Amino acid sequence: MGTTTKRLAAAAIAPAVAGLVLSGCAGAGGGGEAGTDGEGGAITVLMVGNPQMQDIQQITEDTFTADTGIEVNYTVLPENELRDKVTQDVATGAGQYDVVSVGAYEVPIWAKNGWLKPLDEYVEGDDDYDVDDLLDPMIASLSSDDQLYALPFYGESSFLMYRKDVLEDEGLEMPERPTWDEVADIAAEVDGAQPGMKGICLRGLPGWGEMFAPLTTVVNTFGGTWFTEDWEAQVDGPEFTEAVQFYVDLVREHGEAGASQAGFTECLNAMSQSKVAMWYDATSAAGSLEDPKVSNVAGKIGYAFAPVKETDSSGWLWTWSWAMPETTTNSDAAAEFMKWATSKEYEQTVGEELGWSRLPAGKRESTYEIPEYQEVSEAFGPITLQAIEEADPTDPGVQPRPTVGVQFVGIPEFADLGTKVSQEISAAIAGRGTVEEALAQGQELAEEVAAEYQ
């Protein structure tokens, strides 16, 4: 490896495997070739513990395994733990897993490092799979040098979810495209509208992909950025500071209990159990909120575009996807699983067996043409698709950026940088320290990262 590649690889794995010394190109050996696997067998899958992944666990044995003879052994972890585990396994070439959950942030970086198998040979020309049906933003985010390195399980942007009945009782109306100032005012009005109900849920759990997923979109629309086009760090800049102070103040004054330790899962539970009146987060949450089997608020939720301030839109762009580490020795079986889990057939199975609102949507055009899904997703399906199409990873703010990414900076070092800064901001939410102190430390860290690119 050249010096640059070594630096990028080390930055990518440092948070998960501190002190590990790599020799040679990580993940370069041990992989089985496509077409060498036999029928049946078993594969290991590492995935994030989101509702869509819980669903696939439930139906795999009676569908995929029954049809193919391939046994699937799942390891499921919370988001932050998943990120550490998958980075450790893939970046070091440990080879423990045949298929892993990865996102739009990791795929381009890991593909360039040679850590993932390209998937074009498995999907091109497969009419049943119909790769052309996948949404263009999903394909673009999971490709490198015109090769596809992951298959999207579900795609998402972000939007504001709110209790229609609560706002109506308080004589309030949510704009289709609210500003953050309007959201803050409404949060104050509905705080305590029902016993034990807070105004809004916002992630405060540390993690570049936890707290900073929503928070970076707030930074963007307030006019801030992590780095300028010329790699000048801006973490303690006035716009970045204003955005973070706004976010911290809002969640401290009108946010969920235990906000400093609340991530996606905690906010989903709070919203579905009527503990909060609003929630700004992933569009993929709507399927769970609208499922009466798991939600107490099905049919009571309204949906608005991601709140803005200085930009026309601010929704993020993300996909949880399936990737095959270069080290897998079960490539054919792994590919068979990945294709099934991202297929039209799989969506049909979920709809028929678990409920149409629970489709892992946001990745295929055809999903939004299914009559049953159109019916159950009338309130959130069209706005989800529009938000995905409006998201612009190349220009998400008010100034040019040095890399792509709406809610992240597309460099290996961002995982460590974003997580460390989020830890300080989470402390500020908990009343331990101030936003200014948190961002002053963040600026020092960001300047160290920027120096590598200037």
Image: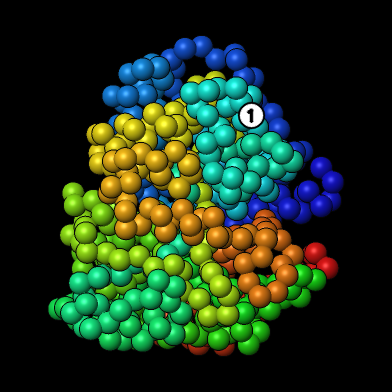
Q: In the displayed structure, does residue 150 sit left or right of residue 210?
A: right
What residue is rendered at 33% in x and 46% in y?
Answer: 374
Q: Residue furthest top?
A: 38
Q: Is residue 286 above or below residue 437?
A: above
Picture coordinates of residue 68, whole percent (x, y): 40, 17
Q: In the displayed structure, does residue 11 sit left or right of residue 97?
A: right
* Snapshot quadrant of residue 251: bottom left
What residue is rendered at 61% in x and 26% in y?
Answer: 124
What kind of residue is marked 1? Asp
- Classify 10 Å Cα crowding around label 1: few (below 14), some (14-19), many (20 and above): some
Q: Is residue 188 above or below residue 122?
A: below
Q: Nearer the viewer, residue 228 or 124?
A: 124
What residue is rendered at 18% in x and 49% in y?
Answer: 293
Q: Which residue lies under the disc numbered 1? A: 120
Q: Nearer the viewer, residue 173 or 56?
A: 173
Picture coordinates of residue 316, whole percent (x, y): 53, 62
Q: How many marks?
A: 1
Image quadrant occupied by the N terminus: top right
Image quadrant occupied by the C terminus: bottom right
Q: Is residue 351 above or below residue 173?
A: above
Element at badge 1? helix
Q: Nearer the viewer, residue 31 or 187?
A: 187
Q: Residue furthest left?
A: 195
Q: Is residue 331 visible?
A: no
Q: Is residue 124 above or below residue 275?
A: above
Q: Is residue 396 visible?
A: yes
Q: In the displayed structure, does residue 440 sit left or right of residue 135?
A: right
* Snapshot quadrant of residue 166: bottom left
Picture coordinates of residue 382, whole percent (x, y): 41, 54
What residue is rendered at 25% in x and 70% in y?
Answer: 163
Picture coordinates of residue 439, whole percent (x, y): 59, 81
